[in-house]
Amino acid sequence: AQTVTQSQPEMSVQEAETVTLSCTYDTSESDYYLFWYKQPPSRQMILVIRQEAYKQQNATENRFSVNFQKAAKSFSLKISDSQLGDAAMYFCAYQNNDMRFGAGTRLTVKP
Amino acid sequence: DAEITQSPRHKITETGRQVTLACHQTWNHNNMFWYRQDLGHGLRLIHYSYGVHDTNKGEVSDGYSVSRSNTEDLPLTLESAASSQTSVYFCASSESLAGGTGELFFGEGSRLTVL
């Protein structure tokens, strides 16, 4: 069974600074997708960024980027120039057919 | 705009009662999923379906059932509700991975309380 581990239950960052959220996963597959989802207090799940395992280049979406290390089975999310609106729960997810999630990291942004 | 809707958004029931949570999507996605969200566990997969008449058990399927009679709907049934099933339930849908992005589109969640 595939498992996803987020070792940081809570993280805090100063507004305009950079923060990195960690994620590791366990799989024997070679083809899969990895995702980061954001869940603000509204409870709505919002896709932040996606990475295909066959792509070596790290995905980037504006202020959000990932460090994908396939051999190490690591998929961290970097948020640059943090904004107050980035405060939320962040979930890492692994997908090969169905999608499995980590336990989440609660990010606080301090003004 | 295409969307995925869940109902009811909030439900309070008693132990032993049967409860059905509805999920309806207009994305025309083949894949549909039910998750439950609990503090410290993230989202855990309950059941999923890859198409009409197809259903599969996820990691926490005991006490839950689903049926898929059409593309748009995947209702989740708790046959005999237990207090351990108090949770927030999310329905999601996606395109098939082959040729699709794999991204899940989520409903807004249904908060179920079992007393």
Image (tube, rainbow, N blue to C red):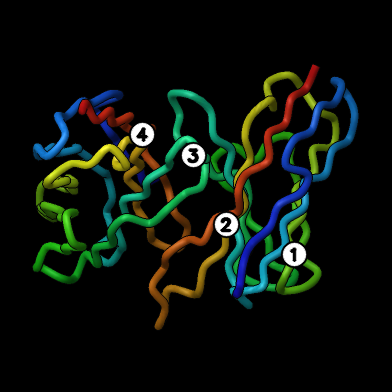
- Which residue type carries mark 1? Asp
x 26%, y 44%: residue: A25
Q: Earlier in the sequence, mark 1 or mark 3?
A: 3
Q: Is residue B92 above or below residue A100?
A: below
The residue at which mark 3 appears reads as B43
Rendering coords of residue B106 (x, y %): 55, 55
Rendering coords of residue B84 (x, y %): 68, 21
Give the secondary structure at mark 4. loop
- Give the spatial CA distance, label 1 vs label 4: 28 Å
- Give the spatial CA distance, label 2 vs label 1: 11 Å
The residue at which mark 2 appears reads as B92
- Which residue type carries mark 4? Gly
Residue located farthest toward the front when viewing the structure as drawn: A111
Q: Is residue A75 left or right of residue A95?
A: left
Give the secondary structure at mark 3. strand
Image quadrant occupied by the C terminus of chain A: top left
Give the secondary structure at mark 2. strand
The residue at which mark 1 appears reads as B73
Q: Quadrant of residue A22?
A: top left
Rendering coords of residue B29 (x, y %): 59, 74
- Decide: marks 2, 4 in contact (CB < 8 A)? no
Q: Earlier in the sequence, mark 2 or mark 3?
A: 3
- The residue nearer to you, when weighing A93 against B3, is B3
- Give the spatial CA distance, label 2 vs label 4: 18 Å
- Give the spatial CA distance, label 2 vs label 3: 11 Å
Rendering coords of residue B34 (x, y %): 62, 49
Q: Is residue A61 left or right of residue B59?
A: left
- Which residue type carries mark 3? Leu
- Which residue type carries mark 2? Ala
The residue at which mark 4 appears reads as A104
